[in-house]
Amino acid sequence: MFQIESAHRIPGGKPIPGKPPRAILMKLLLSTDRDTILRRARECSSIEHQGTKLLFFPDFARETQEKRRSLVEIEKHLAAKDIKYSLQYPAKLRVIYNGTSQFFKKPDQAREWMERMGI
């Protein structure tokens, strides 16, 4: 049983029928509970409640969100080229190419590497 320390909805009006519900922020007592919830949500192909698909995301500090957001264009480019990658905590891009892993903290580093590799 997970122990929720606090939970609240993101401010906003009542959602329109057929549209996604408002986001809910939950603070769990144990970080292991958070990790379990996020892992199980990734393992499921889809989670629904009353016909609405639910999505689960970790909540990051604004600075971490901005760092992760700066890598989005690189991720899109890699996905379009069908190159495996992952985003590691807090904001490190791991690219698997030709059997080796490359790590990047900044988009410029990744762009330079992709140019050298002809990607």
Image (cartoon, helix red, strand yellow):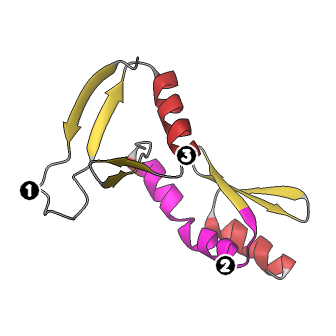
**Which residue does the numbered mark 2 point to in the structure image?**
80
Disc 2 marks a residue whose amino acid type is Ala
From the viewer's perspective, tell me whether residue 21 is left or right of residue 80.
left
The local crowd at label 2, few if under 14, some if 14 to 19, many if 20 or more residues have their Cα within 10 Å, is few
Q: Furthest residue to the left?
A: 13
Image quadrant assignment for residue 51: bottom left
Disc 1 marks a residue whose amino acid type is Gly
> Between residues 14 and 112, which one lies in front from this camera angle?
14
Gap in Å between the C-alphas at discs 3 and 2? 22 Å
Residue drawn at (40%, 44%) of the image: 61
**Which residue does the numbered mark 3 point to in the structure image?**
42
For label 2, the SS is helix
Residue 44, above or below 76: above
For label 1, the SS is loop
**Which residue does the numbered mark 1 point to in the structure image?**
13
For label 3, the SS is helix
Image quadrant assignment for residue 7: top left
Q: Position of residue 2 (x, y in %)?
A: 39, 20
Q: Which residues are magenta?
A: 63-84
Gap in Å between the C-alphas at discs 1 and 2? 37 Å
From the viewer's perspective, tell me whether residue 10 is left or right of residue 100.
left
Residue drawn at (14%, 49%) of the image: 11
Residue drawn at (69%, 72%) of the image: 78
Gap in Å between the C-alphas at discs 3 and 1? 29 Å
Sooner in the amino-acid sequence: mark 3 or mark 2: 3
